Image (cartoon, helix red, strand yellow):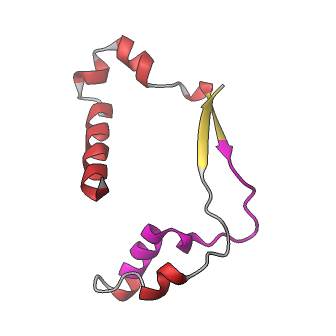
Amino acid sequence: MGRPAWKEARATLQKILSADEPVLCNNEALRKKCLVPMSNIEMLLLMTVGAYTDFFCSMHHAGNCGFIFRGPQTPVNPNWDHMIPTTPSVSLLWKRR
């Protein structure tokens, strides 16, 4: 779907969750169906993170940092696709209690 679809989804969620948007503010049944109280959520870490995590295993993070250091022409070095990350990616999940 690509970046345009993600941008549209994010903008839509931000609009729906804003205080002045009536979609959720004025619909208690929909709020109860869509929103889960934090007291009912347990955050899960899929692995134990050691003393070092290589955040450059995310292309997006590498690109953001590279943009700062190298500019927009080559934010990610061409060899990035061939590098082996030193640690696996870490993901957070949630489940209902």
x and y, in percent, of residue 27 in the image: 31, 14
x and y, in percent, of residue 87 in the image: 67, 70
Looking at the image, residue 62 sits to the left or right of residue 44; the answer is: left
Q: Is residue 48 above or below residue 43?
A: below
Q: Is residue 64 above or below residue 5?
A: below
Look at the image and tell me in which quarter the C terminus lies.
Answer: top right
Number of numbered discs present? 0
Query: At x 40% / y 73%, what residue is drawn?
Result: 64
Q: Is residue 75 above or below residue 21?
A: below
The residue furthest top is 29
The question of residue 53 being in magenta is answered with yes
Range drawn in magenta: 44-67
Quarter of image, res 14: top left
x and y, in percent, of residue 63 in the image: 40, 75
Q: Viewer-proximal residue, 14 or 56? A: 56
Query: At x 26% / y 37%, what residue is drawn?
Result: 15
Q: Is residue 9 above or below residue 34?
A: below
Query: At x 61% / y 25%, what residue is drawn?
Result: 40
The question of residue 56 being in magenta is answered with yes
Query: At x 23% / y 28%, what residue is drawn?
Result: 21
